[in-house]
Amino acid sequence: MTGTLSERRPPGRLAAGLPTSFSALPLWARAALVFVALRVVTWLLMAQAADHAGYYPGVQGPAEGHVDLALNWDAVWYQRIFDHGYPDQLPVGDDGRVQQNEWAFYPVYPYAVRLMAALLGSDFATVAPALALLAGLGAAVVMARLLVETLPAAPARPRRTEALALAAVGVWAACPVTPVLQMAYTESFSVLLLVTFLLLLVRERWWAAGACAVVLGLTRPIALPLVVVVLVALWMRWQAREERPLPTGERVAMTAALGLTGLSGLLWTAIAAVGAGRRDAYPATMTAWRGEDRIAFLEPWKRTITYAWETHDKVFVLPALGIAVPLVLSLLLLVPRIGGGLDLRLRVWSAAYSVYLLAVVDGHTSIFRYLVALFPLAVLLVGAHRPEPRAWQLRTTVWVVVGIVGQVGWIWWLVVFSPLPGGYGDYPP
């Protein structure tokens, strides 16, 4: 018998064939471990904050003496949908204005929690955060695959591409608002569906992408800017028609993807109109949160920026920066010399979504949570869109640490309920 035992075993593996190093694991397992490790850090921060949080019925729960920050704020509304579904009539106050109600919240997440709870014989408080966490885990795994397939290729060093993709996933999973990925919120589901949709577009699986868009349109109101991404994807495929001819079947599928994506952005508005028996059910419900009679494009941000300039109050300054900085970075991604190494569809998604937020979303503290869908910015921060990024390990470490520190601020400022002077309300996460 020739050779030693170590010579006869594949490097980095045990006799039983189990990986002995992180780099030997498959990509999906490494992405999952990165995500789980960062969620453990977040769980410790949330647990520490919960120990010092007071109990406020209707906001923070589930019960006095058992404050669970994963079940507060919007989670209360999702539990109402879980328990009772949606009202068949909009609640109206004495002044004739529509009041806040369940139609503002999309159905995929609460009904998925209801189904899983029924299958497990469990309750909302147990299943809702767990399901959000699992969806976030799935989002990290799919995101890693999406980035590997779209980052600049290095044929001689495929592991480098995977390492850069994982670095970007780590920076995204550590960012200040990612505690929401383990709260009873719908962001985990929306990011999972978003990255799945983009991966299907990259692979030119048009029918599947359209179907995914429809489900996304019932998860969070982020489907409309995807129409721009689909148009870019169709244009890219059309440009390649000489090398890869376009059969009639694929042309039909491409048209279907565009149509289904456009439909997905309007689907919940139509369902709410039928369910509540009122054509303006969804927009009327949304104005109940804004305290206005109509949704005015850009106007909320004009006020926020004006107040930020005049008062220097963080309640206005930070949201103003929260939309301005990502918007600028996203637009810079469109500049070939800056973001040219990143797939055009991902760059267009970031720009279209940022402009969409500026146009239709209020300039309040929830804007930070909405930014969790801008994962391509993590690629920019790491430098993973460059064929040979400099100091990417150091940059990754710095941004992960910055993100965790930011989580502390986001949790204590917005997730923990602290009544404003006068004892009423607080700024929402």
Image (cartoon, helix red, strand yellow):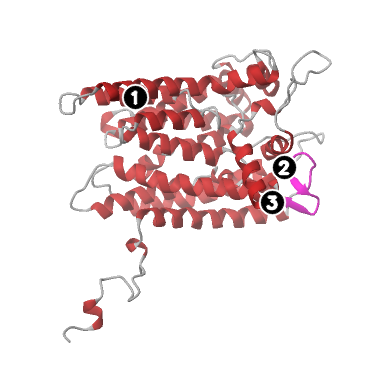
Q: Do the residues labelled 1 and 2 touch (CB within 8 Å)?
A: no
- Give the Cα distance between marks 1 and 2: 48 Å
| Upstream in sequence: badge 3 or badge 2 | 3
Count residues near mark 2 (Cα–Cα under 10 Å), then give few for <14, some for 14-19, many for 20+.
many
Q: How crowded is mark 1: few (under 14 residues within 10 Å), some or many (20 or more)?
A: some
What stretch of residues is rendered in magenta?
A: 54-67
Query: What amino acid type is highlighted by mark number 2?
Result: Phe
For residue 87, above or below residue 165: above
Q: Main secondary structure of the magenta part?
A: loop
For residue 303, say whether it is visible: no
Q: Name the residue under label 3.
A: 122
**How dense is the environment of label 3, judged by Cα within 10 Å: few (below 14), some, or many (20 and up)?**
few
At mark 3, the secondary structure is loop
Of the numbered discs in the image, which one, if any, rests on residue 417? 2
Question: Is residue 200 visible in the rendered structure shown here?
Answer: yes
- Residue 300 relative to residue 90: left or right: left
Query: Is 7 left or right of 375, judged from the image as shown?
Result: left
Is 60 one of the magenta-colored residues? yes
Q: Is residue 420 magenta?
A: no
Residue 424: mark: none
Q: In this view, does 68 lie to the left or right of 179?
A: right
Query: As shown in the figure, which amino acid type bears the numbered disc 3?
Result: Ser
Look at mark 1 in the image and give the residue it sits on.
Answer: 253
